[in-house]
Image (tube, grey):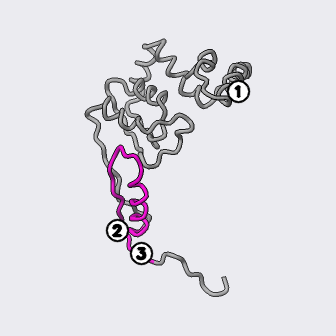
Amino acid sequence: MIPPAEAEKLVKDESSQAAAKLYPAYEQTLRAYQGVDFDDLIALPVRLFDDHPDAQERWQNKLRYLLIDEYQDTNRAQYRLLRQLAGVRGAFTAVGDDDQAIYAWRGADVENLNLLQQDYPRLKVIKLEQNYRSSNRILNAANTLIANNAKLFEKKLWSDHSMVNRSASLPPGT
């Protein structure tokens, strides 16, 4: 949600400098072809709702509930859009795991999980710690690894599965 003119002011290194120089031409090309990119799909509604509160209110009334999956991979603009759409009613479900955040390179901020709790004090956190696919042996290894991660939420993965040979045997000659 950074306009081309501001992008040049935020340059920190050579690669950012090159991107900032290309940014105006990129935006111009998008507009010439009446195209939008991924970021525009978020930025355009955010701007629309900022400029037209009546449109925001209409959408808030139209969308009774929101479901956001992979919430740990949302960025600040997406969080802002959630807030605009959820409004005061705040009727939404967000599913996310702070240990599975993989889109920081795209601006995703796992801290958005924390913001949810601050901005929606009635929010109920439900930890999905039971795993239905893996054995406890695998989950113990996973728990050992994720214990080294910076944590927003403490969790301990577990399973009812014991180590069972799950390989299928085929009849001879197949």
Residue 51 visible in the snapshot: yes
Element assignment for label 3: loop
Amino acid type of the residue that numbered disc 1 sits on in the rendered structure = Ala
Amino acid type of the residue that numbered disc 3 sits on in the rendered structure = Met
Residue 46 placement (x, y as % from top left): 49, 21
Residue at (56, 81) in percent of width and height = 169
Quarter-of-image position of residue 8: top right
In three-dimensional space, the C-alpha distance between marks 3 and 1, rounded to whole angstroms, equals 53 Å
Quarter-of-image position of residue 91: top left
Quadrant for the C terminus in the image: bottom right
Relative to 133, residue 47 above or below = above
Residue at (43, 49) in percent of width and height = 99
User: Which residues are the magenta region?
Assistant: 135-164
Quadrant for the N terminus in the image: top right
Estimate how packed mark 3 is, as few (under 14), some (14 to 19) or many (20 or more) residues with alpha carbons within 10 Å: few
Estimate how packed mark 2 is, as few (under 14), some (14 to 19) or many (20 or more) residues with alpha carbons within 10 Å: few
Element assignment for label 2: loop
Element assignment for label 1: helix
In three-dimensional space, the C-alpha distance between marks 2 and 1, rounded to whole angstroms, equals 53 Å
In three-dimensional space, the C-alpha distance between marks 2 and 3, rounded to whole angstroms, equals 10 Å
Q: Earlier in the sequence, mark 3 or mark 1?
A: 1
Residue 97 visible in the snapshot: no
Task: Specify the label residue 18 is tagged with.
Answer: 1
Which residue is tagged 3?
A: 163
Magenta segment's dominant SS is loop
Tell me whether the residue at label 2 lies in contact with that at label 1, contact meaning CB atoms closer than 8 angstroms.
no
Which residue is tagged 2?
A: 160
Magenta stretch contains residue 162: yes
Magenta stretch contains residue 153: yes
**Frontmost residue, 39 versus 68:** 39
